[in-house]
Amino acid sequence: MNDSTRDDSNGALSNLDLETPEKPYLDSNELIINMGPQHPATHGVLRVILKLDGEKVLDTECVIGYLHRGVEKIAENRTYTMFNPYVDRMDYVAAVSNGLGYCEAVEKLMNVEAPARANYIRVILTELNRIASHQLWLGTHALDIGAMTPLFYTFRDREEILKIFERYCGARLTTHAFRIGGCQYETYAGFEKDVENFLTFVAPKIDEYEELLTTNRIWIERTKNVGVISAADAIALGVTGPVLRASGVKWDLRKAQPYAAYSEFDFDIPTGTNGDTYDRYLVRMAEMRQSLRIIEQAVNGIPEGPIMAKVPKIIKPPVGEIYHSIEAPKGELGYFIVSDGSTQPYRLRVRPPSFVNLQALDTMVRGLLVADVVAVIGTIDIVLGEVDR
Amino acid sequence: MPDFIMSYLGIKDAVTPGAAGSQFWALVYVFIIFAGVSVAVMAMNWLERKALAHFQIRLGPMRVGPHGLLQPIADAIKLMLKEDIIPAEADQFVFWVAPLIGLLAAFTVYTVIPFGPSQAVSDMNIGILFMLGVSSLGVLGIVVAGWASNSHYPLIGALRSSAQMVSYEVAMGLAVVSAILMTSLNATGTGTLSMIGIVQAQQQQGVWFIFKFFPLGLIALGIFAIAMIAETNRAPFDMAEAESELTAGYHTEYSGLRWSLFMLAEYAAMIAVSSIAVALWLGGWMRPFPNLLNAPAWDFIFSLFPALTFFGLAAIAIIGVVRMPAHSFFKIQRIGLAAFAAVLGFIALLLLVIAVAGRSADGSVAARFREGIDYVYWFVFKVAVFMYLFIWYRATWPRYRFDQLMKIGWKVMLPISLVVLIATAIVGVLVS
């Protein structure tokens, strides 16, 4: 998706010649391949049109929208409370983060602050979700590059997180854990214990993943200097999250614009230097460990108190608009809400990290080989539910 | 009559049916090998799924038969019953013939694989050349399949495969040549290309070629072992069918029985190249330490291994029976597994009887029979080690990228194999 096509109203295909070749067999010049929407490595229904010279990628075109459900339009016809579960269905592997962003945005619009205890619960669950999301990313990314085994290891360990979610709110994936103004549920008996057990359980497991991959010769060869994006390019393209940080930009909304209770915790922002696939891998692995640190501090310091702020039964924010963004596992997740004072948003716009990060695909893969395309798609860590909304 | 059969079984005169000039017994051997390889492929299929599953903290097939033992059969039936799709745009005839080429190439190689000094269809005097030549024909099936599919992904898969095979064939061939050079260092001073001759050369020189001119033999085997993974398109060199990149590579458009022929060919080729490695470097049919522990007592102890192996397998099956849940749902499975254990135990007993009866190397029928079993057992055992490695690699490593694969082939493996070849030649001349 380069600049010339983004403004093109005729759709994404305009600058590629997709007409049927005259010869019945493939001619020897360029090959146009549809990677997706049904392809094992496009993480759902992403369609990438590749223009190949042999195996070399000359041009790419992302075609999205196969999973479009019109979430933003739905929001205009639902009350603020009713829309809350819908956001879980965008980035369904990090549903808790989506819910946090939405609830905080509405709270900000209403000038309500969630109580401290609620904020701590939010942080714990969100960070758990970050680990779960990164685990899923690692498994599928490794599978794309050909290492089958890490997938099963990560899914085994992700299960423990989902169990905690299930015990907390009854759902495993689309949790709908938070409400506007705080949390619906008090932690269950043994929540802290479960989380602490998880911390001691998962730390060696992360080492285990690293053992399989970090120093693996083939892994390094497949990821080092693949899909490089410079810091300037990344910023220009609006890339956020681990992809941006791997390019050396120390930008994390948890530190830059602290929300929830993040200002109270001590953690580092891991950054890379080269902005290649390997650095993004290292950054995410380090982020998992930082998340563990945050969770540990949060569980130890969780205050007593109410979990719900005083919010009216019927949520009617004052007329106005708000943009609030959080650091989702994949990058900056922003909600822009325009309120006309009614019970429903006048307009709700989501700034999904996957969608914006996906723009960098073309910059990253141009000139690389077909095998690198899947590696780069994996390393951007997209979820098509969020890209298409 | 028994003598007549024995003579053609090659047990009496210790020559292969091909050398004895018996077309009938050669045909019988061919059928035995064809059946044996097909069963081995099925067993390998099951083992790969189970072993891979356990690497990956899964159970693998568990439903069809006890511990999924009947899964390969179920798979075969399923594949045969599936609709046979030939894409409308495909080149019909070539599409039809492609899997057969691969299969033929994979199975033809078995004519010269020396399971024992006389346990082979034929002892061709250019055995190793024949083997390398025919096994590289397998790539023709892949290229043709990719082309005939008239589809993008198969085409890329086929092109990758051909480039890959061409580059690895070179290093592979040079490694083989260094082993052939070593054969000329025996008493007569003449080398041989015959597969049986190569193993016999190792016997005469009293050393497996893997240890000859240490570490030259070892490096040559290492190069061959890497090249043979590339040659058979297995992980981490499975670019031709890289699932995450090319959906299924060259056989994307294939379905049903045709697809299963590709699988059969792939596994048969894996066994075949492993056999080359075993014959060339690991002493072929010879038992471990044939010179060091050469007392008749050691002969007897090593001849117990086939029986022990089957006893071990039977014991594992019995453990499976014991550990099976007591629920009545598992009744049939338990009976089935117990029967399987009984069959394994019976085979083990049979082997034990033969080993004991034929313990004296006096040339009696029993002794010859025992020797034959030993040869085949040790050969298959060594091949099985390689087969297990194939699975292990697949579970452990990511996939190389195409250009990296080529780089390794041409810039690393080829120079090393050349150096090894030259060094082997120099050392060989100095020694003799």
Image: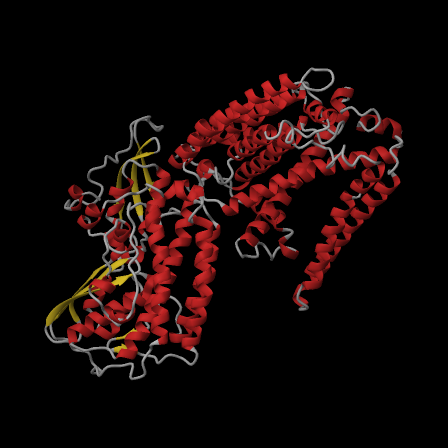
**Does A172 appear above or below A273?**
below
Q: Is residue B416 left or right of residue B207?
A: left
> Which corner quadrant of the image does residue B216 belong to?
top right
Quarter the N terminus of chain B occupies: top right
Q: Residue B287: where, in percent of width, then height?
A: 74, 36
**Does A73 appear above or below B49?**
below
Residue drawn at the location 46% of the way across and 47% of the way down: A147
Residue drawn at the location 30% of the way across and 38% of the way down: A50
Q: Residue A183: where, in percent of width, then height?
A: 30, 77
Residue drawn at the location 44% of the way across and 33% of the way down: B405
Q: Nearer the viewer, residue B32 or B352?
A: B352
Q: Is residue A301 left or right of residue B121?
A: left
Q: Nearer the viewer, residue B233 or B141?
A: B233
Q: Nearer the viewer, residue A364 or A102?
A: A364
> Which corner quadrant of the image does residue A33 belong to?
top left
Q: Is residue B26 left or right of residue B135?
A: right
